[in-house]
Image (cartoon, helix red, strand yellow):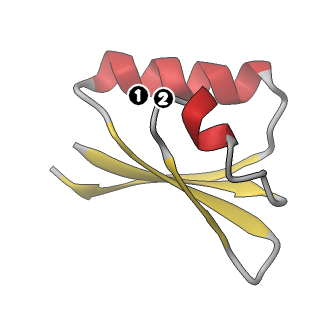
Amino acid sequence: MIFQIRLKGHLAEDWGDWFGGVTITLEADDTTLLTCQVADQAALHGLLRQIRDLSLPLISVNRIKP
């Protein structure tokens, strides 16, 4: 499954390695789009837990490919 996670503000692109190979896209509206492939719901929850633990402001989570 491929998901896009939108965060408020811009992250440095090297955060992609810390998140385990996530692609980071900086958007013009001062948001960051994380595009990631996850194996299952547990992996998605793990990624969201990392975002929460870093106090990054979450805007949305969307599945773009099953």
Number of marks present in the image shown: 2
Which of the labelled discs sits on residue 63, or is there none? none
Query: Residue at the location (62% across, 28% down)?
Result: 18
The answer to whether 6 is drawn above or below residue 17 in the figure is below
How far apart are labels 2 and 1 at the CA level? 12 Å
Which of the labelled discs sits on residue 20, or is there none? 2
Q: Is residue 44 left or right of residue 47?
A: left
- Amino acid tagged 2: Gly
In depth, the one of 18 and 53 nearer the eye is 18
Which of the labelled discs sits on residue 44, or is there none? 1
Q: Earlier in the sequence, mark 2 or mark 1?
A: 2
The answer to whether 19 is drawn above or below residue 32 in the figure is above
Disc number lying in front (2 or 1): 2
- Badge 1 density bin: few <14, some 14–19, many ≥20, Cα 10 Å: some
Query: Residue at the location (57% across, 34% down)?
Result: 17
User: Where does the image place residue 6, in percent across and percent down from the top left?
Assistant: 62, 57
- Amino acid tagged 1: Leu
User: Where does the image place residue 2, in percent across and percent down from the top left?
Assistant: 28, 49
Quadrant where the N terminus sits is: top left
